Amino acid sequence: MSACNSIAEAVWKDIKSTRSVTHDQLSILHFLFGKNFERATRIVDQRGVKRISGEPSGRCVFQVVGESRRKEEYFCFAEHYCACYSFFYDIVNRGEQLCCKHQLAARLAASVGACVEVNVSDEQLAILLSKL
Ligand SMILES: [Zn+2]
């Protein structure tokens, strides 16, 4: 599990430095994350990742649209947390996956610069986060 995680971290770092994804990187991410990665790329293609940044601190949280018909949005920290059901069930409880598709989508969008950027005041961000 942790070896996978450090491979993934290295790939994200490369993508971030070039702002693009090579075929090899896609293969690795697909190998590590499988179907979740396919779902994440679909979310990014639909511009479904918002990055909400607080000013002046620069602290940010992602808001990622889900794939169900209701199009609900989940607050998500790319590395540590997502508000969706799968995060609690598959990742925290069962430890079967490294992260959920929303976290992957946030990671991918941030790395290639495909987020919809939203700026709010730090107060507004604090209010958003207090509702998590
Ligand atoms: Zn999620």
Image: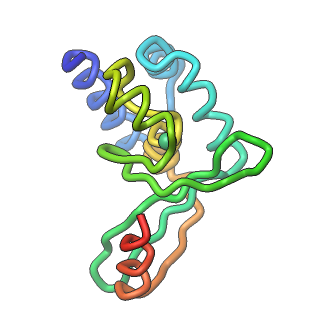
Q: Position of residue 79 (x, y in %)?
A: 31, 43
Q: Is residue 90 above or below residue 84?
A: above
Q: Is residue 124 above or below residue 91?
A: below
Q: Position of residue 25 (x, y in %)?
A: 45, 21
Q: Position of residue 3 (x, y in %)?
A: 20, 16
Among the 4 quarters of the image, the one containing residue 2: top left
Total number of numbered discs in the rendering: 0
Taking the spot 67% from the left edge, 54% from the top edge, the residue there is 72
Taking the spot 53% from the left edge, 18% from the top edge, the residue there is 23
Horizontal relation, residue 88 to residue 108: left or right: left
Q: Position of residue 132 (x, y in %)?
A: 41, 63
Taking the spot 61% from the left edge, 56% from the top edge, the residue there is 73
User: Which quadrant does the N terminus fall into?
Assistant: top left
Horizontal relation, residue 44 to residue 31: left or right: right
In the image, 105 versus 75, the foreground residue is 75
Q: Is residue 112 above or below residue 12?
A: below
Q: How is the image coloured?
A: rainbow
In the image, 82 versus 103, the foreground residue is 82
